[in-house]
Structures are given as structure tokens and as C-alpha cells.
Image (spheres, rainbow, N blue to C red):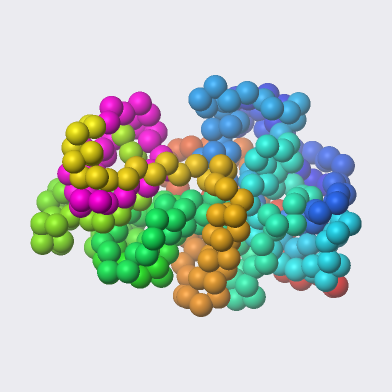
Amino acid sequence: MRAAWYEKQGPASEVLQLGNLPTPEPEQGEVRVKLSFSGVNPSDTKRRLGFGGQKMAYPAIVPHSDGSGIIDQVGTGVPKNRIGERVWIYCGQWERAHGTAAEYISIREDHAIPLPDQIELMSGACLGIPAVTAHRALLTDGSLNNLTVLVTGGAGAVGNYAIQLAKWGGAEQVITTCSSPEKENHARAAGADLVINYKEEDVSAKILEATDGNGVDRIVEVAFGANLPSTVALLKDNGIISAYGSDIEPTPVLPFYPMMLKNCVLRWVFMYKIPEDDFANACHDLNDWLKKSSTHHMVSKIFPLEKIAEAHKFLESGEATGNVIVSIGGENETLKK
């Protein structure tokens, strides 16, 4: 099968290889998926670079955890009627060597989630890490009914889903921040009630004006360290900050007393370590949302597998608005059962 992989860490153009690898066979409890699309996430590029001291866990790594395709074989213990099923995949390359940057992947059957008929396979490859992260950040700590939610970075892959899931979950007002008019348009298309350009406007002043000086109940935070002073100031008493990124300031100092006096909750969101039961609940909720809502999947750019290094570099450039996708067999929408 065609695949991309790396045998050492480093820049994409120097370490990513293209070629043929043996086609995997599904083991007990697994399904084999003929992949159509593979999603590229920051965790994929950081792992390839050795970010945070990450080492090569395997001699060769086929990258990417997210993807979509069609089940073409099943292992023992898996119902044969799953053959032909369209699925979206998560954790494809978490604690395993073989991710979704290949024509096939064999994976635990519960990591291949049925994709609702009305959702395109390309959109399915956008879900995984971004959608589960957004769900964890918003829907783990009780109802959103009548609450005000702030999503920082609303034009990012996680931010896009966080805006939509906040509205779906019952939030009364969803506020988001962006850095350009183009990104503002994407955030509005996702359903944000108020979009603030943080490069041109006073974010805190705009939020306080929009909330009659009350601030927000929940914050989904992509730049925790950099935004911490304003985040704490804008958060209501008993509010919740769900942080999933802090690249600009990776070692922030927490203002203990201001946070304690608000009795706030700080939730760290690391998608790969979510408990199994919570993962299952998230996937159930996400499919319910996909079936019952008009969903917005934001694809910034699509690259063929042969240009996977360019896909990685594009994501690392910070220019992406939404998801970066690698097309592997995107034309294959159906298989005979």
C-alpha cells in the first residue's frame, strides 16, 4: 500500500518519506479501513519534531491520528456487517506506529465511528482530535443552557467545532476571537453571536459591553498563558476555563488568589488521555449532533499524499484556517458489501 512515514524526527521536508508498506490485516477486535482522507493536526507535526522532548517511540511512524474511509475487512469478534461502513477515525497514531497517512489502517473497532450518511468523507476526517477536544472542553462540566461562552481562536479547527457545539449545547451567547476579516466570516458561519478581531479591537472591553459587564461563564482557551490575565478578569464567579493550548506562553504563572476568589475551575484538555467512557460518550454526542444539525466543517487546504510534507509545513506556518487534509483515496465513497 502507498504510505508516508518517518524514521527520525526533524523538519517535514527532511524526514517524511513516501513509498510502499505492507498492507495491514485486522487483528481480533479490529477493523481495516480503506482510507479516503487523513487529517493533519498540531500534535502530529509536534510529534514529528520531537516537541517537548518526545522521542521516536517506534523505528518508523506513519503519522496522523484522524481520518475517514470505508471498512473493507474485519477481525475476529467484529460483526461482518461492518464491512462497507463509512467511518471517521480517532487516535489512529496514538501509542501505535501506524496512523492514517496511508491507504489502509487496521484499528480498534471502537475507534472507527460510523459516519452519518449526510456527512461527506472529507468532513469526517476533520472530526477526531478537533471535535472531541471541543466536546471535552464544553460538555464535560454540566449544562450550557443560558450560559455565555467565550471561544478564543474561533477560526481554528477546535474553535470552529467549539462554537457549533456550544450553540448545540444550549449556550445563550457564544463569543469568539479571530485575527482577520476572513477568519471572522468563518466564525460567523459556525454560529458565533459576537466575533472580535483581537488585533484591532479591545477584546475585554467588547466582551464586557456585550455581557452588561458580567463577563462569561465558560472559556475554551487556545492560548492559555498569553490570555491568562484577561481570561481571569472576564470569567464569572464559579466559571470554568478549559485550556487545550498554550504555545505562545508555555510556562505561565497562575494568579492564585484572583482565581481562587472566583472559585473557578481550570480544566486541562488533552484529548489522548480522555477516559474511555468519556470518549465513547463524546463520539455518541458528536454523531447525534452530526445527524440532527446543520454542521460546518472548515477545510483550509487539501494536499495529495505525495505532498504530505507541504501539508505539514502549511499547518506549521499558522496560515491554516480550519483543518488541513491529506487526500488518499477521496473518490472512493462506496464499497460493495
Above/below status of 81 relative to 241: below
Q: Position of residue 263 (x, y in %)?
A: 24, 45
Question: Quadrant of the rendered structure where residue 151 is?
Answer: bottom left
Going 83% across and 40% down the picture, which residue do you hit? 20
Question: Quadrant of the rendered structure where residue 58 is?
Answer: top right
Going 53% across and 66% down the picture, which residue do you hit? 285
Whether the magenta-drawn stretch holds residue 105 is answered as no
Give the side of residue 108 with respect to residue 50, left or right.
Answer: right
Above/below status of 251 relative to 115: above
Report the quarter where the C terminus lies: bottom right
Give the side of residue 287 with respect to residue 296, left or right.
Answer: right
Above/below status of 119 relative to 310: below
Q: Position of residue 160 (x, y in %)?
A: 41, 58
Give the side of residue 50 with respect to residue 306, left or right.
Answer: left
Comparing 19 with 169, the one in front is 169
Question: Quadrant of the rendered structure where residue 167 is?
Answer: bottom left
Looking at the image, how many numbered discs can be counted on the residues? 0
Going 55% across and 47% down the picture, which residue do you hit? 274
* Span of residues in magenta: 226-254
Q: Position of residue 281 (x, y in %)?
A: 56, 61
Q: Position of residue 334 (x, y in %)?
A: 76, 71
The answer to whether residue 189 shows anywhere in this view is no
Comparing 216 with 179, the one in front is 216
Going 50% across and 42% down the picture, which residue do you hit? 270
The answer to whether residue 74 shows anywhere in this view is yes
Comparing 134 with 120, the one in front is 134
